[in-house]
Amino acid sequence: MFAGALALSLLTVVGCGGSTSSTRSASSSDGQPPVSAPAAAPEQPARADNRPRVVFLGDSITAGLGLSPEQSYPTLIQQKIDAASLGYHVVNAGVSGDTSAGGLSRLDWALDGDVKVMVVALGGNDGLRGLPPEELQKNLATIIERAQARTIAVVLAGMEAPPNFGQTYTVSFRRVYADVATQYGVPLIPFLLQGVAGIEGLNQRDGIHPTAEGARTVADNVWTVLRPTLKKS
């Protein structure tokens, strides 16, 4: 469960949108105009990755808010997949500020292409806003049903609600994930931020989004459950 200080940070940060994209610019080192430089070759389009897809449907934690793209946990999962020679391409469909309802609304887009496995990592923002656990359960169930109807394997990542809404809410919120996983027979990551939440050195200054080191722990949490699913698929 979240510590009190972490809960305060959760209330102000996780629900916020954000962008982590970085840009690079080049300039002349001496301030002089270039001297008859040869024309650059036209940029080649990125080569399409035709491997079957693993989609991560989540919020800012999945999107990697505050991190460079290569530090996000889905990118780290891609590295683990490649090292294990499992032949899947990871698609990061994390959107900062998304609730379970938001994830459901963009599900068809997220499942475009040859998707074989989907990791559902939603609910943190539902908890921050005190949305009814019944709505969370309904949204997660619908997401899983639609994915399974397309013969897509699903892994569900659990999340905790901050304690400020009371113990009854916190317990009911946590139970949603176990109940949905049991109902639909999907593997469950008990808590996505296990070993990271509340640990100062593994979180950014906002107190909730993982640092690069924290993201590695999150990737380990996910990989423990995801790898057997990938091997089956």
Image: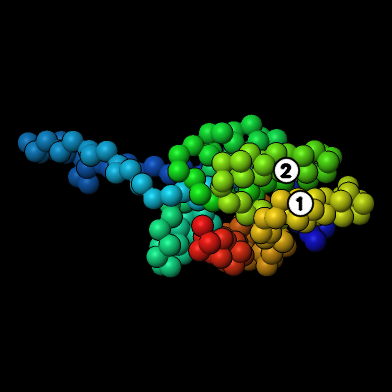
Colour scheme in the image? rainbow
Q: Quadrant of residue 100?
A: top right
Q: Residue at x 56, y 46 (%)?
A: 151
Front in this rendered view, residue 182 or 45: 182
Mark identifier at residue 172: none
Q: Residue at x 61, y 51 (%)?
A: 154
Q: Nearer the viewer, mark 1 or mark 2?
A: 1
Q: Dot 1 corresponds to which residue? A: 183
Amino acid tagged 2: Ala
**On screen, residue 204 above or below 55:** below
Q: Secondary structure at mark 2?
A: helix
Mark identifier at residue 141: 2
Count residues near mark 1 (Cα–Cα under 10 Å), then give few for <14, some for 14-19, many for 20+.
few
- Mark 1–mark 2 Cα distance, whole angstroms, equals 9 Å
Q: Residue at x 63, y 39 (%)?
A: 146
Query: Where's the N terminus, which quadrant?
Result: bottom right
**In the image as oriented, which residue stretches furthest toward the top?**
105
Q: Secondary structure at mark 1?
A: helix
Q: Earlier in the sequence, mark 1 or mark 2?
A: 2
Q: Residue at x 91, y 54 (%)?
A: 167
Count residues near mark 2 (Cα–Cα under 10 Å), then give few for <14, some for 14-19, many for 20+.
many
Residue contact between numbered discs 1 and 2, judged by CB atoms under 8 Å: yes
For this view, does 74 lie left or right of residue 13? left
Amino acid tagged 1: Gln
Front in this rendered view, residue 50 or 68: 50
Picture coordinates of residue 5, whole percent (x, y): 79, 57
